[in-house]
Amino acid sequence: MLLVTGATGKVGSAVLAELANGPHRVRALVRDPAKLTVRAPNIEVVTGDFGDPSSLDAALIGIDAAFLASAFDPRMTELQMNFVEAAKRAKLPRVVLLSGIGANARQCCVRTLRWHGQIESSLQAAGIATTSLRAAFFFQNLLKLGITKEGVIAGPFRNIQWPWIDARDVGAVAATTLTHAKHVGKTYTLAVPELLSYHEVAERLTAVLQTPIKYMDISANETRGRLRLEGGSPVLVEAKLELWDAFASGYIKVEPNQLVKEITGREPRSIENFAHDYRTRFLRAA
């Protein structure tokens, strides 16, 4: 049986969609079953929380491989460490981990890289066979970033070309690596075959949506103010700004690749595919 944590998230729900109605029995771990969007006869739903180790122990009974992902949270390392400890107790054979590009357990200037790196290192230290998926920026995050009524995407992203990927393609890779043990010990950096600046993203969205969209570069301080007005946690606001600056300044560099196709046999979705699929939400926002 396979376990999918974070099953109501962007990637977790995509993993479930890939596994639904397939040959494998699947257990979806959720805090609120009402929020689960993917259901199928082969999917069993259990309620649990990374903050409740006993619920993790129960969820891991009879599990052969697990997909590990949790919300972007200041306590992400602590919460996922609870899962690592529960996995050790359960003698879980394999984990597929949703990590991040540039994950680094050492002390560095970007806290999210440390968070992801610490989890990768903890799984290794626990002796659990792991496949790490270091995912690029999700196209879906463009929806959360927002487009103003004037058709503007604003942020401190400069003119650097960024690595992107559709969360659904990360879910497809996760489902494949969950069901094939040959990926054990691998670390995959997942991105589409081309890097795109935010100016280029705006141009591509304009072409598909047939509505003018442009990118406006603003300072980190102005971005900070906007994120806080939206109710962002101060810790997470600073974590985002650190990560964005690390990419925009070239501290983290990524080469385009074809790993999605190599692993799943399918072409990754392009920004055009994404914009077409989410057209209604974009136009409602704009």
Image (cartoon, rainbow, N blue to C red):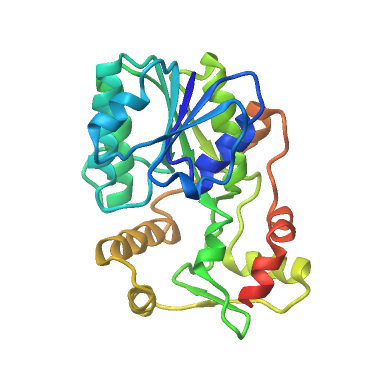
- Total label count? 0
Residue 134 image point, x, y percent? 46, 38
Residue 206 image point, x, y percent? 72, 72
Viewer-nearest residue: 43 or 254: 43
Q: Quadrant of residue 259?
A: top right
Residue at x-position 34% and y-position 37%: 48
Residue 17 image point, x, y percent? 62, 37
Q: Is residue 131 above or below residue 210?
A: above
Residue at x-position 36% and y-position 40%: 103
Residue at x-position 44% and y-position 61%: 248
Residue 143 appears in the rendering: yes
Viewer-nearest residue: 240 or 57: 57
Q: Quadrant of residue 101?
A: top left
Residue 121 appears in the rendering: no
Residue at x-position 57% and y-position 56%: 140
Q: Is residue 113 above or below residue 217?
A: above
Q: Is residue 246 above or below residue 32?
A: below
Residue 166 image point, x, y percent? 61, 48
| Left or right of residue 261, residue 2 in this image | left
Residue most extreme to the bottom:
150
Q: Quadrant of the C terminus?
A: bottom right
| Left or right of residue 141, residue 209 in this image | right
Q: Quadrant of residue 18?
A: top right
